[in-house]
Amino acid sequence: MPFVMRLRLSSLKEGSQIIELALGKDDLSIADIPFLQPVAVTLNIYKSQYQITVKGNLQTALELECDRCLEAYRFDVETNFQAIISPEKSISSEIDENVIPITSKTDEVDLTPFARDALILEIPMKKICSESCKGICAGCGTNLNKNACRCSSTHTDDRLTSLKDLLTNTMEE
């Protein structure tokens, strides 16, 4: 696994600094997400005497498949993450997943897992190309966004015929 987002702590100066870079899917070890472009990463780093705060911004575009119509569509992603790099002795007993504990011997910190997790969390559970997507016909498979369906719209389940008759008889009485 590449360590493209390794932050060398000894090279950081006190105060604020910005680092910009571009990552590919191989850099993030995400093989099953179809990136349309590299991930643009901006790291805002603030180093104080006690800790280092990293605020990352990620921007990219993915090619997803719509769950309704099965067509590929572009999905723009912009997300953020934050990590706090702090000496072990200053960390409270509660474990925070955004805190990276370091010792006096630690010289590098890998921020790749933070970027990978932030990107994965931005992918919607239900991938829909647009709110107006009509999907595909369950009968013939026609993409209803492109063509009208030629299936019979009066298709009824034969098992429900007796219930329909019962409802009709009740309304007549």
Image (spheres, helix red, strand yellow):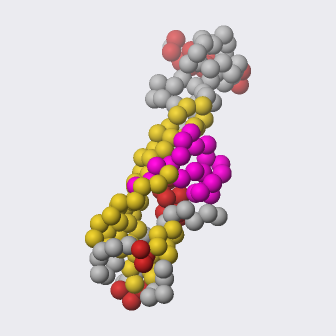
Q: Is residue 55 magenta?
A: no
Residue 145 in the image: state x and y as whole percent: 56, 19
Can I make out residue 160 in this image? no
Residue visible at 66% across and 24% down in the picture: 138
Q: Residue visible at 46% across and 29% down?
A: 131
Is residue 44 shown left or right of residue 58? left
Q: Which residues are magenta?
A: 23-42
Which residue is depicted at the point 45% across and 80% down? 101
Q: Quadrant of residue 144?
A: top right
Q: How many marks?
A: 0
Where is 45 relative to 125, above or below? below
Q: In this view of the protein, can residue 145 be seen by the observer?
A: yes
Query: Residue 23 location, x and y as percent?
Result: 53, 53
Q: Nearer the viewer, residue 26 or 141?
A: 26
Q: Image point 61% across, 43% down: which residue?
A: 34
Q: Quadrant of the N terminus?
A: bottom right
Q: Position of residue 171 (x, y in %)?
A: 51, 15
